[in-house]
């Protein structure tokens, strides 16, 4: 299934991209979400393939100013957003600039809910004080509480031991309406005991939301991991996932296939689940609007040049076929644990069974549906795991797309992508 899905999603993202110099205007009555990308990192984790660069104050302040300029361009098109997701990279790398950017977004777009990512070393009173009241969901990138894994991920020296990270999280519990911790499962050198310990610490942490991602890599990173610590074994992934479900079921409610809430409330991690369409701003950000994927340039120099000329920093646009749009809609809905059949028919003027008969047949055969009537589809535990596999394949292809985009950047920008403390990580 992994091989098949990587092939299918890969075809979509390798389809001939077109040039488009501006985003379309919003559709009246449509609900949109805003994604803001901050690519700067203090440590370049070897497993990560999101668009990120080594931080440097000489260009970070300029980037935030450009980001706010792009907000004005989007606002002139007439967009309004209820929610905003700030991801990276490490968005909290310059707190005063981040606070200014959040305030401007709320003023321009009427935003009422802000979700923001951070790292454990930023859970300090001064930083938390600036986020309090501005951010409703704070997501802390923990990845694992195991010191051995943290050392492998090059995070131990910068972010501290697993116990130190746990103590920092416990200190900020209750300050934000939603405090999420991100963890990863199925690292090649992650034993079942390490996973069990991570689960116990996550439950003990007092965070009211936990997100357990499967290891998702690009082709390049997958090879690098295989050469250093071993091959990723997808055959044990399901077993690890069942352990996560069993451990969290007593204290948490599933909000998506891999996000669990302690009280059943709160903002979930994936903005692509809560909104059909979204606008992404920042270098390397994606927008999905009207069945088209718009990609901002990954080049910081090109990003600055476009905005200085008053242009939107778009580099490519990929148009989804009607079938791809329906499949994407169904995947994101089921990943969010519920597909509304009536709404699907209202949007596409065809039933999901007719539109995606092969996909529905497969999911029924593997007993993926807990409820499957004329109104909705909901998922069994097996169905949730199927969504984990599908989303892993989808995001892995997105990571491959990012790697291809980054590999074509000018040589002077490769240093920002590949060097940490004078050491080449990968090229």
Image: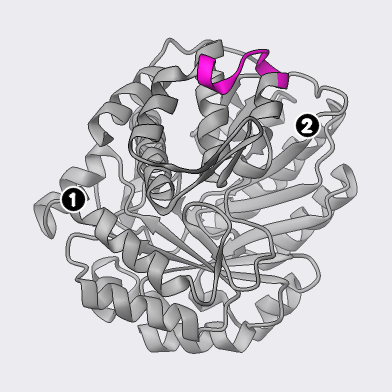
Residue at 57 percent of width and 46 percent of height: 336
Question: Which is nearer the eye, 180 or 42?
Answer: 180
**In the rendered structure, are the residues bearing label 1 and label 2 in contact, judged by CB atoms less than 8 Å apart?**
no
Quadrant for the C terminus, please.
top left
Magenta region: 346-354
Toward which corner of the image does residue 74 lie, by quadrant?
A: top right
Question: Which is nearer the eye, 251 or 269?
Answer: 251
Q: Identify whether 375 is placed above or below 16.
A: below
Residue situated furthest front in the rendering: 373
Whole-percent x, y for residue 280 in the image:
64, 37
Residue 235 — which label? 1
Q: Secondary structure at mark 1?
A: helix
Q: Main secondary structure of the magenta part?
A: helix
Quadrant for the N terminus, please.
top left
Residue at 56 percent of width and 20 percent of height: 325
Q: Is residue 68 left or right of residue 122?
A: right
Q: Is residue 108 left or right of residue 169?
A: right
Residue holding disc 2: 74
Question: Which is nearer the eye, 212 or 371?
Answer: 371
């Amino acid at each position: 299934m992994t091989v098949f899905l990587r092939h299918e999603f890969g075809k979509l993202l390798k389809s001939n991209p077109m040039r488009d110099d501006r985003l379309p205007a919003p559709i009246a009555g449509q609900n949109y979400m805003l994604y803001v990308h901050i690519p700067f990192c203090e440590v370049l984790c070897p497993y990560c393939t999101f668009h990120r660069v080594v931080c440097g104050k000489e260009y970070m302040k300029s980037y935030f100013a450009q980001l706010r300029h792009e907000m004005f361009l989007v606002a002139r098109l007439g967009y309004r957003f209820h929610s905003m997701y700030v991801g990276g990279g490490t968005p909290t790398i310059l707190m005063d600039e981040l606070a200014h950017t959040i305030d401007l977004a709320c003023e321009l777009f009427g935003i009422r809910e802000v979700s923001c990512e951070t790292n454990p070393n930023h859970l300090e009173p001064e930083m938390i004080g600036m986020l309090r009241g501005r951010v409703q969901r704070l997501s802390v990138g923990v990845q694992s509480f195991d010191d051995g894994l943290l050392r492998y991920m090059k995070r131990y020296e910068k972010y501290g031991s697993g116990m130190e990270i746990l103590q920092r999280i416990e200190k900020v519990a209750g300050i934000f309406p939603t405090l999420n911790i991100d963890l990863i499962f199925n690292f090649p050198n992650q034993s079942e005991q390490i996973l069990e310990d991570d689960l116990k610490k996550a439950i003990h942490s007092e965070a009211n939301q936990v997100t357990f991602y499967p290891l998702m890599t690009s082709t390049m990173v997958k090879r690098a991991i295989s050469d250093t610590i071993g091959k990723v074994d997808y055959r044990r992934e399901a077993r690890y996932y069942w352990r996560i479900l069993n451990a969290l079921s007593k204290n948490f409610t599933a909000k998506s296939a891999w996000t669990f809430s302690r009280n059943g409330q709160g903002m979930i991690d994936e903005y692509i689940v809560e909104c059909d369409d979204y606008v992404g701003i920042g270098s390397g950000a994606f927008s999905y609007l009207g069945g088209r994927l718009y990609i901002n340039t990954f080049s910081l120099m090109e990003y600055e040049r476009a905005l200085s000329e008053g242009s939107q920093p778009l580099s490519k646009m990929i148009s989804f076929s009607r079938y791809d749009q329906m499949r994407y809609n169904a995947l994101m809905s089921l990943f969010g644990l519920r597909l509304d059949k009536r709404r699907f028919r209202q949007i596409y003027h065809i039933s999901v069974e007719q539109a995606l008969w092969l996909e529905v047949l497969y999911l029924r055969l593997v007993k993926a549906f807990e409820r499957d009537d004329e109104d909705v589809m909901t998922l069994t535990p097996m169905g949730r795991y199927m969504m984990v596999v599908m989303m892993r394949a989808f995001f892995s292809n997105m990571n491959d797309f990012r790697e291809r985009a980054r590999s074509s950047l000018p040589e002077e920008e490769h240093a920002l992508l590949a060097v940490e403390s004078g050491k080449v990580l990968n090229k």
